[in-house]
Amino acid sequence: MRSKQITWKSSAAFAISTLTILVGSSSCANLLSSFRNASVATISVATTQPLRSVQGDSTWVYALAISPDGRFLASGSYDKKIKIWDLPSNTLLYTLEGHGDAVVSLAISPDSKLLASGSWDNRIKLWNLETGQLLRTLDGHTDDVEAVAISPNGKWLASGSADTTIRIWNVQTGVQVHQLSDGKWVRTVAFSPDGQTLASGNESGTLKIWRLMDGAVLKTLNAHSQAVRSVTFSPDGRTLASGSADRTVKLWQMPTGKLLHSLNGHSGVVWSVAFSPDGKRLASGSNDSTIKLWGLPKGKLLENLIGHERGVRSVVFRPHGNMIASSSADKTIKLWSLPKE
């Protein structure tokens, strides 16, 4: 992966910003835009300068989510704000405000109409993704909400918190229907594709698989030597990936819990892991400022994406096409166009 930087001078109202075009191993054009004076800049594809810039307080971008229909990109930041972008037109639609602390987790419903946000203010908020309207606030957690996930049928929302609980909410009513006690700081949660189980990772490095029907723990895995920061199921539900503060990515066979692979190479905390839509690749974002792309099922390292200047906090695949979005403590979002398999 090679990069070329172009300095672009904007109008007098804006400071000099930097646009970086990334070129991968294929002939496909790649892109990213990185604006030091904006919380998130509009990202333009196949062009040599941004469509527009967004002026605001510079801040860490903690969380990303892309809607299943591929239209919306949502970002959550340390400045308590959420930004909603229209990907096809590369424009900022809304800036959502309402949280009292950093927004560290986002999830979008299967129908691409609802956004859930989790914050260090102990609250979860549900937003209309098409209008930006706040629909309701879910109160119940007594400490930071670290993770939110929406079930494949769109009916349930799971939240994990520093209060050591996982809570299951009815999305339509906002009513809490289950409270699961992990006993440790819950860092991450993910629904299985069939919606029958929930995976969670905690501060002590333990993975748990919960049955949604009754909250029973089906499997407990002493998975990592340090905190589990991210978990995600493969599209077919047969593999669970976990990323950890111990700098490893691990792949687990489901439902047996057998360790398939331990992927080494990152030199910092692995904050985020994501499967490609076809399940053939896994992306991992790390505090070492890189994104690694692994080939499955063997776990072979395919690409090492370098471009962020600080730790990568979130990585997500676009549902259609070979594209990854990443967010970082360097205050940028980057889009990466990947070579086709």
Image (cartoon, rainbow, N blue to C red):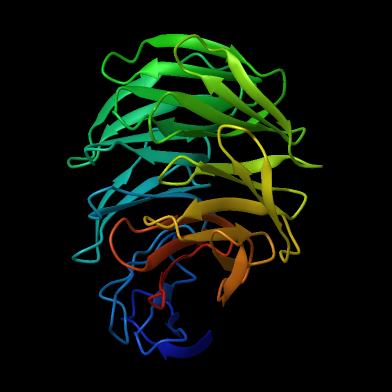
Q: Is residue 55 left or right of residue 309?
A: left
Q: Residue at x 56, y 36 (%)?
A: 254
Q: Is residue 328 above or below residue 29?
A: above
> In front: 238, or 284?
238
In the image, residue 175 lies at what x, y percent? 36, 10
Q: Residue at x 72, y 23 (%)?
A: 184
Residue 132 visible in this rendered orientation of the protein: yes
Q: Is residue 19 left or right of residue 73?
A: right
User: Could you tell me how many numbered marks the image carries?
Assistant: 0
Location of residue 172 by image quarter = top left
Residue 119 visible in this rendered orientation of the protein: no
Q: Residue at x 38, y 80 (%)?
A: 30
In the image, residue 59 lies at what x, y percent? 52, 56
Q: Is residue 170 left or right of residue 312?
A: left
Q: Is residue 88 left or right of residue 292?
A: left
Q: Is residue 287 above or below residue 22?
A: above
In the image, residue 43 lies at what x, y percent? 33, 70
> In front: 90, or 269?
269
> In front: 10, or 254?
254
Q: Residue furthest right?
A: 225
Position of the C terminus, as image quadrant, is bottom left
